[in-house]
Image: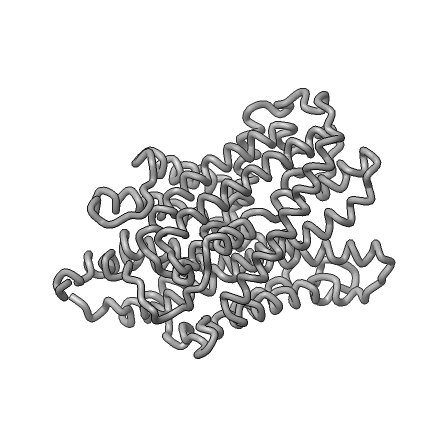
């Protein structure tokens, strides 16, 4: 290919990298060592977490009733539209960065920058929120064992008497950073093992609970009306993504073009089956009015005389949510690495460990940053930093896959999204609809972060971009 053919498309802030150039696989950069099932495990690890152990009960109790099943199905279908868009890109572009990279290639540098910039904060905040959640479960288990810990280490300031720092949450963030810095192969082995334990616990809950289902509890199925099921879908949607963060590891897959699309689809399919079965059992074991919105399955099992399983469920929740931390910290570090490699952020951040071939500097920065958020912010304030960036990433990817299909129908694709352009259009529209549900404070945070990103891009990224001197 000649230099002219490799010249970037677009101009100014909308300059783009040629698809053929960015799609080239090389031996340089991150270590390619992940197989299909390791990638799938990372995806499942990112999707299944608080959705089963906490969110399902809360939505069933106060929003949808037994129709929480429908809520998960609606959210799953909407998420699948975005997942298929990710899968088509993953089969074309075996590079780290996910939505950032896809937006950069198709819609231009400025779009890619702002999606990447926002995901840096979103993913880091998700890691912190999840760490706080795990810390709560861990405290519950220690209390069950009769262990009394000093109040100063049990939560962020303002969350309880004498609370100074959520020490467990801090240590969890640093632990995940340490594991990721051991190398992707070792880290993926740990993730695969823990995901296996998590799925085993979920299956145990489903199988044992199935024998205590009373069909009368399913009536009325829509106690809050059909609208309640749709409102529930907007809530549980945030429990049915995670493949987006997993797709940032494309550059670490052994055969990214073949395995990444399959891993995206398989991870969502496996997770949705478990979600559907779990919600059927939950609302069948106990009337939706009596389900504890904070510990749904614990209350359901206690209602049928199986309270001894509460501790098992708590352990399963800890294990399940831990894998979410792993997936999203992996995601943010790979987005940061890609932006640094492209010149939009200083190259210092993108420096790889000489032996383990992982971006160790940004991994520790994210580990410490998420630890500070988790240790010193209440969970609600930390959660307010999340959501909007991921939904915007979904919109960008769904739009970009349509644009590229018509702009470059000849580009090699190992997976072709069906139902073009209807399916990705539905994915984009549903994501936009969900954005309207977000709190005003989320928009305020987004506006401040967006403005800061514009300054960084204007004064540094635009001029230092790897495409800046190319014509």
Q: Position of residue 196 (x, y in %)?
A: 61, 52
Name the colouring of the figure. Answer: one colour
Q: Position of residue 182 (x, y in %)?
A: 54, 71
* Residue closer to the observer: 220 or 42: 42
State the residue at coordinates (41%, 52%).
260
* Residue closer to the observer: 36 or 443: 36
State the residue lying farthest toward the bottom: 354
Using the rendered view, name the quadrant where residue 318 is placed: bottom right
State the residue at coordinates (87%, 58%).
146
Q: Is residue 131 left or right of residue 403?
A: right
Using the rendered view, name the quadrant where residue 345 is placed: bottom left
Q: Position of residue 109 (x, y in %)?
A: 29, 59
Q: Is residue 407 left or right of residue 435?
A: left
State the residue at coordinates (46%, 71%).
358
Q: Is residue 20 left or right of residue 220?
A: left
Quadrant in which the N terminus is drawn: bottom left
Quadrant in which the C terminus is drawn: bottom left
When the figure is inspected, residue 369 is found, relative to residue 139, above or below; the finding is: below
State the residue at coordinates (59%, 31%).
69
């Amino acid at each position: 290919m000649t230099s002219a053919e490799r010249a970037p498309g677009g101009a100014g802030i909308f300059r783009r990298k040629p698809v053929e150039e960015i799609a080239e696989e090389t031996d340089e950069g991150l270590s390619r060592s992940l197989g299909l099932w390791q990638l799938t495990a990372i995806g499942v690890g990112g999707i299944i977490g608080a959705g089963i152990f906490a969110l399902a009960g809360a939505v069933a109790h106060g929003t949808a009733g037994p129709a929480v099943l429908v809520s998960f199905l609606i959210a799953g279908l909407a998420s699948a539209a975005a997942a298929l868009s990710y899968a088509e890109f993953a089969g074309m572009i075996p590079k780290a960065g996910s939505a950032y990279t896809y937006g950069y290639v198709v819609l231009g540098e400025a779009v890619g920058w702002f999606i990447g910039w926002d995901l840096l904060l979103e993913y880091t905040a998700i890691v912190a929120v999840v760490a706080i959640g795990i810390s709560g479960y861990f405290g519950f288990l220690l209390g069950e064992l009769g262990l009394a810990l000093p109040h100063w280490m049990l939560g962020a300031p303002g969350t309880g008497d004498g609370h100074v720092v959520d020490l467990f949450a801090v240590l969890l963030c640093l632990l995940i950073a340490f594991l990721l810095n051991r190398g992707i192969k070792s880290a993926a082995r740990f993730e695969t093992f823990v995901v296996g334990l998590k799925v085993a616990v979920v299956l145990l809950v489903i199988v044992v609970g199935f024998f205590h289902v009373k069909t009368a509890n399913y009536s009325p199925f829509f106690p809050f009306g059909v609208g309640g099921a749709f409102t529930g879908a907007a809530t549980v949607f945030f429990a049915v993504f995670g493949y987006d963060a997993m797709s940032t590891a494309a550059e670490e897959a052994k055969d990214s073009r073949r395995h990444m699309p399959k891993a995206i689809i398989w991870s969502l399919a496996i997770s949705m089956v478990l979600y559907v079965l779990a919600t059927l059992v939950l609302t069948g074991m106990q009337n939706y009015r009596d389900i504890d919105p904070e510990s749904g399955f614990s209350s359901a099992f206690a209602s049928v005389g199986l309270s001894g399983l509460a501790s098992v469920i708590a352990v399963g929740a800890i294990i399940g949510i831990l894998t979410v931390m792993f997936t999203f910290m992996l995601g943010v570090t790979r987005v940061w690495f890609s932006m640094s490699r492209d010149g939009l952020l200083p190259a210092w951040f993108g420096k790889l460990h000489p032996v383990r071939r992982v971006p160790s500097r940004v991994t520790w920065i994210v580990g410490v940053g998420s630890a500070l958020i988790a240790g010193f912010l209440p969970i609600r304030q930390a959660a307010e930093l999340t959501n909007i960036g991921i939904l915007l990433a979904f919109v960008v990817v769904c739009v970009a896959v349509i644009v590229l299909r018509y702009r470059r129908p000849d580009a090699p694709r190992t997976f072709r999204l069906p139902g073009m352009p209807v399916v990705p259009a539905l994915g984009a529209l549903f994501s936009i609809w969900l954005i309207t549900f977000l709190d005003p404070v989320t928009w305020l945070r987004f506006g401040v972060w967006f403005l800061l990103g514009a300054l960084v891009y204007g004064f540094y990224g635009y001029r230092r971009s790897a495409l800046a001197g190319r014509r």
